[in-house]
Amino acid sequence: MKLNRRDFIKISGATAAGIAVSGLGFDLKPVKAHAGMLKTRYAKETTSICCYCAVGCGLIVHTSNRGDGRVINIEGDPDHVINQGALCSKGSSIKQLTENKNRLTEPMYRAPHSDHWQKVSWDWALSQITDRIKRTRDANFETANAKGQTVNRTTRMASVGSAAMDNEECWVYQALMRSLGLVYIEHQARI
Amino acid sequence: MTKSIFVDTTICTACRGCQVSCKQWHDLPAEKTKNVGSHQNPQDLSFMTYKLVRMREEIIDNHLQWLFFPDQCRHCVDAPCLATAFNEDAIYQDPATGAILYTQVTKKLAADEIIGSCPYNIPRKAEDGTLAKCDMCNDRVHNGLKPACVTTCPTGAMNFGDREEMLAMAKSRLATVKAKFPKAMLLNPDEVNVIYLVAFDPKYYSDYAVASSGRGGISRSVALRKMMGPLAKMMRV
């Protein structure tokens, strides 16, 4: 709100009068900040897409403009053509993807037959994954089926997931899985 | 002009978007819950759950009906909790929006008396006795936004606007819905700012869906206090 000098005097005059009158015992409404300030008042707004299902609802993400830039609030984008501001319960909780103390921040590994998880490094985890994929694929790769038709596939591995991937990530993921020869590829949005 | 929320339960799918976005906007923690055989979760409102979609399975006229009721404070036009508290630092009404608001000062009130005065059994107390409930997202409303629950509702069951506009919408929806559900009704539309439209007898939805004669309202002593209110306030200042 822009105030010129005249407005300012008017407002401060009214306030002074209000205080003076209330001091005389008249019943004025309590002077309270009903509204307060929006917690998103000084936040940075970024649009995004909900990652949970194939509907693809638009989001407005409010992040702190000072310090750590953490997420303050995420709500449906009223200008988005698909959801027009609406979000389901899962979408409404999406802030928890980043702002949750129970969230995992390091890769965890549970060895075969083990009953507990242990923290491992990204390097170790990624090299283990690639190593095992390569070994399983090479050991079980079929170039042709029983009829002699070329198939170039492996049926010893399957991919299930992920609910947290968006459309574009799914495309890249699908391309990767096909290039390895996987035929069992499933996604949460289809289940 | 005061604001109202119109909740059309006939098109509510109990997705609970309202329930979660309420928690999200107010930065409220999750409840620890357990499976009791219903999708309703948690089982009741609390100091940190202002909005709850109640779910009930009822057999009405030989048909199984799964009834959804997004329960919250009704922001009464003339609120018994406000009259009972008789302390505008603790419970007051925002004249601009009509929202009934609770402050930290509610800690000083007799919590059970306030809860007992609510015909809809809404306020809940924390361990230290502070009371809490829905605030109609008064901060959002003053800044031109709809309450979080209304913004997020995917089916249009929740609506927000000027009171007159919401009353008109409620009446016109009631007329439409009556064709399919002859017993449909609005719940206390003249007394509350959160107006529900239900398809069946409100007793099926929740014990306190409609202001019950058994509880709440204004007791004689409160009525007297209310009558003497303006005088007492002058004395106090």
Image (cartoon, rainbow, N blue to C red):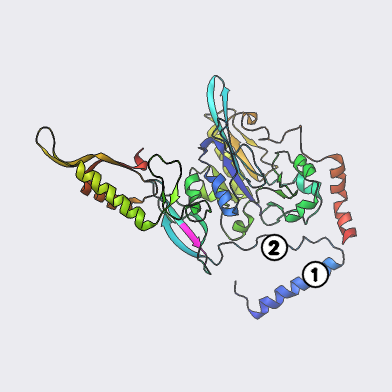
**Residue at the farthest bottom position:** A5
Circle 2 sits in a helix, a strand or a loop, which is it? Answer: loop
Which amino acid, mark 1?
Ile
Task: Mark yes or no: residue A168 visible.
Answer: no
Q: Image check: B118 left or right of B141?
A: right
Residues A84 and A140: in front is A140
Which amino acid, mark 2?
Ala
The residue that disc 1 covers is A19
Q: Residues within 10 Å of mark 2 (few under 14, many from 20)?
A: few
Image position, residue A155 (x, y; %) = 23, 38
- The answer to which quarter of the image holds residue B118 is top right
Q: Is residue B206 magenta?
A: no
Is residue B102 positioned above or below B119 on the image? below
Image position, residue B56 (x, y; %) = 58, 30
Q: Image check: A133 left or right of B133?
A: left
Q: Image check: B218 left or right of B51?
A: right
Q: Is residue A61 magenta?
A: yes
Position of the N terminus of chain B, as image quadrant, is bottom right
Q: Image check: A94 left or right of A1?
A: left
Q: Do marks 2 and 1 share a subunit? A: yes
- Gap in angstroms between the C-alphas marked 2 and 1: 15 Å
- Chain part drawn in magenta: A60-64
**Residue at the farthest right position:** B235
**Residue at the farthest left position:** A148
Position of the C terminus of chain B, as image quadrant, is bottom right
The residue that disc 2 covers is A33
Q: Nearer the viewer, mark 2 or mark 1?
A: 2
Residues A72 and A184: in front is A184
Image position, residue B204 (x, y; %) = 62, 28
Task: Mark yes or no: residue B77 visible.
Answer: yes
Magenta span main SS? strand
Chain letter for mark 1, please.
A
